Amino acid sequence: MKQTILTGIRPTGKLHLGHYFGATRNWVSLQDDYHTFIEIADVQALTDNFHHPEKVRENVREITLDLLAAGIDPNKATIFIQSMIPEIAELTVFYSNLVTIARLHRNPTVKTEVKQKKELFGNQGESITYGFLGYPVSQAADITAFRGELIPVGEDQLPLIEQCREIVRKFNSIYGETLLEPEPLLSETARIKGLDGNEKMGKSLGNAIYLADSEEEVSKKVMAAVTDPNKIKKDDPANPEICMVYYYHNLVSKENLNTICEECKKGSRGCVACKKELIRNMMEFLKPIQEKRHYYEERPELVDKILKDGTEVARREARKTMETVREKMQIDYFKEK
């Protein structure tokens, strides 16, 4: 039998190239060989957008369109909405009794995200909510509700998987062997840099190219991309290793990469011409993705059906888990014998 994979994404906006190369492309390749659940984590998105639920609701659809456009096949993978699975919330409550506040504060991933909040929002970043601090507990519920065996993650997410494994071990030690300890499935893909050279591509940083971007939007962004600051004149030699235009050529147009590199170093390639070539290559790369997205945009009833059907499949799996959990915890009152 195929092993079960559980992965998820917060609906905080459309998918960009960082999402695609960092995760989504990998999910597409895994769906043929694994029993794959893809969670649209709208509850986790609400930890940052609790006062703007309309944004989260809209982004659930945008994320779904992007996932389908990128190659996720609803006949192979189960796409579902987190908030529509009440068993996840139930498990989160039970697991919260097994984790101390101090342990959550020590989680390296949480510490990093708290630091980022403080840098972005100043004093407001001090107002960390219980929901935000406790999201690793909710994530453990996500994984175990569907008996996830393998979890595709980058190295920065390993502490979250270890937190889940700790919760599983604690639960099993109290109530008997019930839950599976998930194993991380490390992605070999590195984090994709932003157009400004930042190590992370992100919406809040304004340095991302989105899968749904028009040619006009891509052109505007690429023309503003960071290049070698020492290249002053068109014919000056440059270092492609510190040029974000070359970096993106390496992502979407590898067949001409050696020529681009050599011409850049010799000074026979101007930055404007190089950027225009990247725009053409970028749009060629995005074309099949955007065509498929357009197909689903014109069929909203099909997208609704995919989400509804996937959520129903996920709910059935979560119910099975909860039946066992409630029995082991001796809270299966009025159960028919």
Image (tube, rainbow, N blue to C red):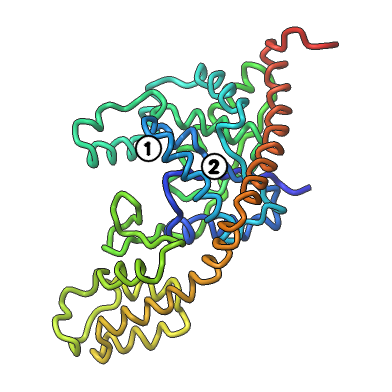
Mark on residue 62? none
The residue at 45%/61% (across/down) is 212
Q: Which residue is mark 2?
A: 40
- Disc 1/disc 2 C-alpha distance (Å): 23 Å
Residue 333 on image: x %, y %: 72, 8
Name the element at disc 1. Answer: helix
Q: Residue at x 27, y 88 (%)?
A: 269
Q: Mark 1: which amino acid?
A: Pro
- Which of the image's four quarters has the C terminus? top right
The residue tagged 1 is: 108
Q: Residue 217: name its quadrant.
A: bottom left
Res 248 seen here: yes
**284 or 324, which lies in front?**
284
- Locate residue 115, reporting x and y percent: 27, 38
x and y percent of residue 72 in the render?
62, 56
Quick check: can you spot residue 5?
no
Is 67 on the left-hand or right-hand side of 159? right
* Residue in the image at 49% along x and 28% along y: 137
Q: What secondary structure is marked by label 2?
A: strand
